[in-house]
C-alpha cells in the first residue's frame, strides 16, 4: 500500500502517544500497530523502514523496528 | 395470535416505595402512595369509565366521567385526580354515579357525529366504548343545536365547524370528532416535549390548535404520533387505519431506525401492516416513538425495492435477473477465482449495522471461516469505532454504561457532539422530560441545535469550533482539577492513582486552561468554567455523546477525555450518571458485539488470542487466521493498490456514506467482484456485479442491540418479499463457496453466539421472550442482564486515566478554503436516506441544504435559497443555501441524506488516529454562488442511471 498514507497513519499514532513520554510511547505505538494493522500494511511499512524510513517520527521508527524484530519473518 | 391489548391504567405509575391499602368496591387494594384511585381500581381489575385520562400523561380531571363516591367524603370526586389514602372506602358504581355519567355522555354525544359504522375509529373508539359502558340509549337534546359536527346548519354555514386537516402525510385531524379531552395536547407536552399543540378558545369555542391555529404540517409538530396514540376518538387517526381498517393481530418487534431501539407493536391484517404503535413495555422507549419508527415504514413495499437476484459481468452492462442459485454460484465462482489469482486475503466483506445480530454474526463467520481471512469490517468503522477503542482503554468495555431509564435520575446532562432531538428523538423526549423537572443541560456543539432551542429547556451552550473537542474537554478537566472539584475518594478507590496524578498534572498545565484554549476553540472561558462546575458539583452528571465526538482525527482521544472526566468526578457506576454513546444505527452496538471488526472475534476478543481462537476453531471446525484484517478505509486503499479485489457488502451504502466519494469510486471500480446485498439498488450497487435482494426488518426473525446494550427481539410479521431472509442469503452464498452453515432458525444462531461469547452466555430467545429484553452482560453473574455497568469497580479492574493532548487536525482552513464544514442529521430523514427518502417523510426534507451564517453569506453574495457551489480539497458539489445564525461565522453545516447532493464528495481522507474512523465533521471549504449541479454531479447522475438498467426478461418459450 502507498507508503505515504501508512507513514501518515503511523505518525498520527505516534502523536497521540508522544505526550506519554518516550518510555511509554514506544511500546504503546508498537502494540497499537501490532493489534490493528493487517499484514500487508505491516509488510509495506517494514519495507519502507528497510528503505530508510524517511518521514517516520523517531518514536514511531523505534516502535516499528522493535515490532519487526518481534514478528516471525514474513511468509 | 390476536391483538395485544395493553392495559390503560388511566394515570402514570407512582414510584413511591410506601404502600397504601384501601377498599374499592369491597376489594382490598394495596398500591404505592401517590397512585390515583382510578389506577388503583384498574389494578384491582375494575375499570372506571374515563375519557380524558390515559396513563402516558398526568391526570387532568376534565371529562367528569371517572367520578367515584368515597365513604365519609362529600360529592363525587374524579378518580383520576384523587390520590389513594389508607383506609378509604371507594365505590365506583352507584345509582348517583350512573346518572351523572349518563348525563355527561349524553352531552358529549349530542355534539358528535353518529357515523360510527363508517368511521375510521370504528372498533377502536373510547367514546363509543364509554357510551356503551354507561348504558347511553338516548340523547334528549337532539343534534340540531349549536354544534361542531355539521358544515351547515339550517342552510347556513356553521362557523363552529372546521374541515379535516389532512396536511400531515400520516394522520388526519378531524375537528368535528374532537371532544376536547386535551390528551393530544398533554401528550405533545409531557411525552414528546414539543409543545406544538394547545387548546385555543374557551368553553364551547375550545379547539385543539397546532401552533397558532395552523395546519399540522405547518406547525412545530414533529409528527411523533404521541397525540394520535393518545386520542380516544377518530379525531387524530392514522391514514393507514382509515384506508385499511382495524388490525386483527399484532406482534411486538423492534424499530430498525436509530440506536434507541424502540419497541413497537406491528399491528397487522394478515400480512399487511396496518400501523406501528409504540409498545409501553418497551424498556428503551416506554411507549413513545418518533416520526420514523411510527410512520416511515412504507419503504418496505416501495416500488423501487428489488426482489430478484441480479448479476452482470461488467458494471457497464445492464443487470440480468437470475435465480438465487445462479446468483450464488456466479458470486462464489468470482470470489474464489479472485482468491486463486490474488491470494486468500484479496477478498473481504462488510457486515451491516442495519441487520440483526444473527445476520451480522453469520457474515463475519463466513469471512473468517469461509474466506479464511479477517477482512471484515462494519459501518461502525465510520461512526462509533472510537467509542469501542476509547472506552475499552479506560473502562474495559466497548459500550455505554447506562440504560435509558437512568436519565430519570440525572441532575446534569452534558451533550457533546450529538443532537438527540433530531437523531435520537425518543431519548431526547425522555431527557427533556427530566430537564423540565429541573435537571441542568450543557450542550457542546458547533451549532445551536434543536436541543439548545427546546421549549422550556435552558441550555448552557458552548459553541466550539469544529475539531477542537479535545481542547474543550481537557479544559473542562483543567477547571475540575485546578478548582479542587475532583471526587478524590472515588478516584482513589476505583482508579489507578498514579495514572490519575500524571493526568491531573497534565490537565492542570496553564496551556490547557479555558482561557488559553479559547483562541482555538472559540468557547467563552467563563461559560466553560461554569459548565465544568455544574457538571462536577451539580449531582448526578451524565454525558451523552454522538458522532460529533467520534468522527474526527482525534475521535478516540475525545472519547478517552470524556471517560477521564467522568472518572475524575465520580460520575460512573450508579443510575443517573455515566458515559453514554448515542449509537447511530439500530444495531451498531450489536454489529460491534458480534465480531464485525477485523481485529476481534465476538465479544471484543482479539483475534491473536490463542485460547479464544481455539474455542471458535473447535466449534466452527476450521483454522482461523491470527492476524487482523483490513478496515474499510484500508480495503479501499488496498483495492486501488490491486491487492483487494472482491467484497461482499451487506446492508451498507459505502459509496454514499463513506468519505471522499471519488476515492471510493476508484476503489470499487478497481475490484473484480462487488456483491451488494440490500433492499434497493443503492449507490454502491452502481459499481456492483452481483445484487442479492435483502429482506426488511418486518420479514425476518432476529435480535437488535441498542445503544444501552439492550438485546431485543425482531419478529417476522410477513413472508420475505424477496423470498429469503438475509441470514438465509448469507448461508446460500457461503454454501456456494463451499462453506456449509446449518441453521433452521435464527434462535440457533443466537445459541451459538451465547456458547462462544461470555457476555452473551445467558441470552436465548426463550430468555428474551420471558424478560422482554436483556442488557449484556447477561450470564451466570447477571442472569437478568446489566442495566448499569461498573457498579462496584471497572470491568478492566482499575479505571485508567490517559493523557489527552490536543492536536489540531491537518484539515486546515486557509485563504482558498476559509470555512469549516460540519455535517449532521435531521429528524425526518435517516442517514443516507435509502429508507426515509422512499417514504412520505420527504415532505419535511426534500433536499439537503447548506446552513450558512448571514455574515458569511453576505460576504459571498449568497441569498437564502440560492444555489451555491461547495468546494473542498477533495471535490465539489452544489446545493441550496439556508441562511441562519444557528451556525457561527466561519462554520457551515449540511445534512447528508440525499445522493444527488453527495456531501461526501467534499469530505476528505483524514481519519481518527486509532481506528481510521473518517473525519466527517471537519472539512475546510469555500462557497460561491452557482447556477446548478456541478459537472461531477451530472456525470455521476448519468453513470448511476446507466448502471441501474435492468435487462428486460427474455420471453418465455
Image: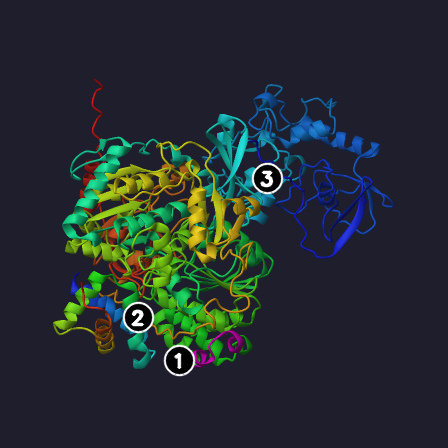
Q: Is residue B920 visible?
A: yes
Residue B313 appears in which quarter of the rendering?
A: top left
Are dots 3 and 2 in contact, CB under 8 Å?
A: no
Position of residue B283 measured from the top left corner of the image (x, y, whole percent): 55, 49
Q: Quadrant of the N terminus of chain B?
A: top right
Label 1: few (<14), some (14–19) or many (≥20) C-alpha neighbours in 10 Å:
many
Residue B41 appears in which quarter of the rendering?
A: top right
- Between label 3 and label 2, give the one nearer the viewer: 2
Chain letter of the residue beneath label 2 in the structure image? A
Write the start and end of the magenta stretch as one range: B491-501
Position of residue A47 measured from the top left corner of the image (x, y, whole percent): 15, 68
Label 2: few (<14), some (14–19) or many (≥20) C-alpha neighbours in 10 Å:
some
Residue A31 numbered mark, or none: 2
- Between label 1 and label 3, give the one nearer the viewer: 1
Name the secondary structure under disc 3. Answer: helix
Name the secondary structure under disc 1. Answer: helix
Answer with left or right where residue B574 lies relative to residue B660. right
Q: Is residue B801 magenta?
A: no
* Cα–Cα gap, marks 3 and 2: 56 Å
| The one of B554 and B376 positioned closer to us in this rendering | B376
Q: Main secondary structure of the magenta part?
A: helix
Label 3: few (<14), some (14–19) or many (≥20) C-alpha neighbours in 10 Å:
many
Answer with left or right where residue B95 lies relative to residue B233. right
Question: On the image, numbered disc 1 is attached to which residue?
Answer: B506
Going 50% across and 39% down the picture, which residue do you hit?
B214
Q: Is residue B951 above or below residue B807?
A: above
| The one of B793 and B501 positioned closer to us in this rendering | B793
Question: On the image, numbered disc 3 is attached to which residue?
Answer: B230
Chain letter of the residue beneath label 1 in the structure image? B
Amino acid at each position: 500500500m502507498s507508503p505515504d498514507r501508512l507513514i501518515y497513519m503511523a505518525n498520527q499514532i505516534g502523536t497521540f502517544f508522544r505526550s506519554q513520554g518516550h518510555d511509554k510511547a514506544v511500546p504503546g505505538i508498537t502494540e497499537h500497530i501490532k493489534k490493528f494493522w493487517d499484514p500487508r500494511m505491516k509488510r509495506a511499512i517494514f519495507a519502507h523502514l528497510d528503505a530508510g524510513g524517511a518521514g517516520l517520527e523517531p518514536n514511531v521508527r523505534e516502535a516499528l523496528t522493535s515490532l519487526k524484530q518481534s514478528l516471525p519473518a514474513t511468509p | 395470535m390476536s391483538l395485544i391489548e395493553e392495559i390503560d391504567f388511566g394515570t402514570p405509575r407512582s414510584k413511591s416505595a410506601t404502600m397504601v391499602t384501601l377498599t374499592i368496591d369491597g376489594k382490598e387494594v394495596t398500591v404505592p402512595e401517590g397512585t390515583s384511585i382510578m389506577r388503583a381500581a384498574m389494578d384491582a381489575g375494575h375499570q372506571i369509565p374515563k375519557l380524558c385520562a390515559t396513563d402516558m400523561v398526568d391526570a387532568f380531571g376534565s371529562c367528569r366521567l371517572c367520578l367515584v363516591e368515597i365513604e365519609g367524603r362529600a360529592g363525587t370526586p374524579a378518580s383520576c385526580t384523587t390520590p389513594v389514602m389508607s383506609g378509604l372506602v371507594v365505590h365506583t358504581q352507584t345509582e348517583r354515579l350512573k346518572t351523572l355519567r349518563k348525563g355527561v355522555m349524553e352531552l358529549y354525544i349530542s355534539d358528535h357525529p353518529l357515523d360510527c359504522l363508517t368511521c375510521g375509529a370504528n372498533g377502536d373508539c373510547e367514546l363509543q366504548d364509554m357510551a356503551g359502558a354507561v348504558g347511553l340509549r338516548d340523547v334528549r337534546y337532539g343534534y340540531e343545536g349549536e354544534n361542531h359536527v355539521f358544515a351547515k346548519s339550517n342552510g347556513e354555514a356553521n362557523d363552529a365547524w372546521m374541515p379535516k386537516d389532512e396536511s400531515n402525510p400520516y394522520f388526519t385531524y378531524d375537528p368535528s370528532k374532537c371532544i376536547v379531552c386535551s390528551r393530544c395536547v398533554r401528550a405533545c407536552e409531557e411525552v414528546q416535549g414539543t409543545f406544538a399543540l394547545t387548546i385555543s378558545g374557551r368553553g364551547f369555542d375550545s379547539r385543539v390548535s397546532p401552533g397558532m391555529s395552523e395546519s399540522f404540517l405547518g406547525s412545530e409538530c414533529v409528527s411523533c404520533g404521541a397525540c394520535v396514540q393518545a386520542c380516544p376518538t377518530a379525531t387524530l387517526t392514522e391514514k393507514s387505519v382509515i384506508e385499511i381498517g382495524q388490525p386483527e393481530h399484532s406482534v411486538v418487534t423492534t424499530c430498525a431506525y436509530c440506536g434507541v431501539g424502540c419497541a413497537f407493536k406491528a399491528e397487522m391484517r394478515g400480512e399487511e401492516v396496518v400501523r406501528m404503535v409504540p409498545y409501553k413495555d418497551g424498556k428503551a422507549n416506554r411507549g413513545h416513538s418518533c416520526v420514523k419508527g411510527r410512520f416511515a415504514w412504507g419503504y418496505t413495499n416501495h416500488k423501487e425495492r428489488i426482489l430478484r437476484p441480479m448479476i452482470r459481468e461488467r458494471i457497464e452492462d445492464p443487470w440480468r435477473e437470475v435465480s438465487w442459485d445462479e446468483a450464488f454460484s456466479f458470486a462464489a465462482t468470482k470470489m474464489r477465482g479472485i482468491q486463486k489469482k490474488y491470494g486468500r486475503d484479496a477478498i473481504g466483506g462488510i457486515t451491516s449495522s442495519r441487520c440483526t445480530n444473527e445476520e451480522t454474526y453469520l457474515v463475519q463467520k463466513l469471512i473468517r471461516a469461509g474466506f479464511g481471512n479477517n477482512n471484515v469490517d462494519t459501518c461502525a468503522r465510520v461512526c462509533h469505532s472510537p467509542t469501542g477503542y476509547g472506552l475499552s482503554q479506560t473502562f474495559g468495555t466497548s459500550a455505554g454504561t447506562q440504560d435509558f431509564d437512568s436519565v430519570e435520575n440525572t441532575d446534569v446532562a452534558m451533550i457533546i457532539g450529538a443532537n438527540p432531538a433530531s437523531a435520537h428523538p425518543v431519548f431526547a423526549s425522555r431527557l427533556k422530560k427530566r430537564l423540565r423537572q429541573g435537571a441542568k443541560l450543557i450542550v457542546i456543539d458547533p451549532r445551536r441545535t434543536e436541543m439548545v432551542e427546546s421549549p422550556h429547556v435552558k441550555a448552557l451552550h458552548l459553541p466550539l469550533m469544529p475539531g477542537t473537542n479535545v481542547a474543550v474537554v481537557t479544559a473542562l478537566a483543567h477547571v475540575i482539577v485546578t478548582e479542587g472539584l475532583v471526587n478524590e475518594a472515588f478516584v482513589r478507590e476505583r482508579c489507578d492513582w498514579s495514572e490519575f496524578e500524571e493526568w491531573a498534572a497534565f490537565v492542570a498545565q496553564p496551556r490547557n486552561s479555558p482561557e488559553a484554549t479559547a483562541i482555538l476553540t472559540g468557547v467563552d472561558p467563563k461559560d466553560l468554567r461554569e459548565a465544568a462546575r455544574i457538571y462536577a458539583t451539580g449531582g448526578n452528571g451524565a454525558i451523552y455523546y454522538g458522532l460529533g465526538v467520534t468522527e474526527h482525527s482525534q475521535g478516540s482521544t475525545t472519547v478517552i477525555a470524556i471517560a477521564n472526566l467522568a472518572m475524575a468526578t465520580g460520575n460512573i457506576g450508579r443510575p443517573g450518571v455515566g458515559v453514554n454513546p448515542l449509537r447511530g444505527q439500530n444495531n451498531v452496538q450489536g454489529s460491534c458485539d458480534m465480531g464485525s471488526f477485523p481485529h476481534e472475534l465476538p465479544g471484543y476478543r482479539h483475534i491473536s488470542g490463542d485460547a479464544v481462537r481455539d474455542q471458535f476453531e473447535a466449534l466452527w471446525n476450521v483454522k482461523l487466521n491470527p492476524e487482523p484484517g483490513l478496515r474499510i478505509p484500508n480495503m479501499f486503499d488496498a483495492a486501488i493498490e490491486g491487492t483487494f479485489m472482491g467484497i461482499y457488502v451487506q446492508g451498507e451504502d459505502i459509496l454514499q456514506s463513506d468519505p471522499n466519494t471519488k476515492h471510493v469510486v476508484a476503489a470499487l471500480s478497481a475490484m473484480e467482484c462487488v456483491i451488494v446485498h440490500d433492499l434497493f439498488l443503492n449507490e454502491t450497487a452502481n459499481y456492483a456485479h452481483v445484487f442479492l435482494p435483502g429482506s426488511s426488518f418486518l420479514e425476518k426473525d432476529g435480535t437488535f442491540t441498542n445503544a444501552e446494550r439492550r438485546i431485543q427481539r425482531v419478529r417476522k410479521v410477513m413472508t420475505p418479499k424477496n423470498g429469503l431472509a438475509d441470514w438465509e442469503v448469507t448461508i446460500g452464498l457461503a454454501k456456494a463457496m463451499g462453506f456449509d452453515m446449518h441453521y433452521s432458525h435464527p434462535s440457533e444462531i443466537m445459541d451459538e453466539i451465547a456458547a462462544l461469547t461470555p457476555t452473551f452466555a445467558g441470552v436465548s430467545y426463550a430468555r428474551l421472550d420471558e424478560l422482554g429484553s436483556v442488557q449484556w452482560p447477561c450470564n451466570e453473574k447477571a442472569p437478568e442482564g446489566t442495566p448499569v455497568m461498573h457498579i462496584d469497580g471497572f470491568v478492566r479492574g482499575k479505571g485508567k486515566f490517559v493523557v489527552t493532548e490536543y492536536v489540531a487536525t491537518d484539515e486546515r482552513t486557509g485563504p482558498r478554503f476559509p470555512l469549516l464544514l460540519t455535517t449532521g442529521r435531521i429528524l425526518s430523514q435517516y442517514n443516507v436516506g435509502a429508507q426515509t427518502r422512499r417514504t412520505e417523510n420527504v415532505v419535511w426534507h426534500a433536499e439537503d441544504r447548506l446552513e450558512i451564517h448571514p455574515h458569511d453569506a453576505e460576504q459571498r453574495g449568497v441569498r437564502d435559497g440560492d444555489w451555491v457551489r461547495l468546494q473542498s480539497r477533495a471535490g465539489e458539489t452544489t446545493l441550496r443555501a439556508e441562511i441562519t445564525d444557528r451556525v457561527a461565522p466561519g462554520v457551515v453545516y449540511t445534512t447528508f441524506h440525499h445522493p444527488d447532493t453527495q456531501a461526501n464528495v467534499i469530505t476528505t481522507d483524514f481519519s481518527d488516529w486509532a481506528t481510521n474512523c473518517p473525519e466527517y465533521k471537519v472539512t475546510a471549504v469555500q462557497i460561491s454562488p452557482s447556477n446548478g449541479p456541478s459537472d461531477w454531479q451530472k456525470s455521476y447522475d448519468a453513470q448511476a442511471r446507466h448502471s441501474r438498467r435492468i435487462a428486460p426478461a427474455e420471453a418465455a418459450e
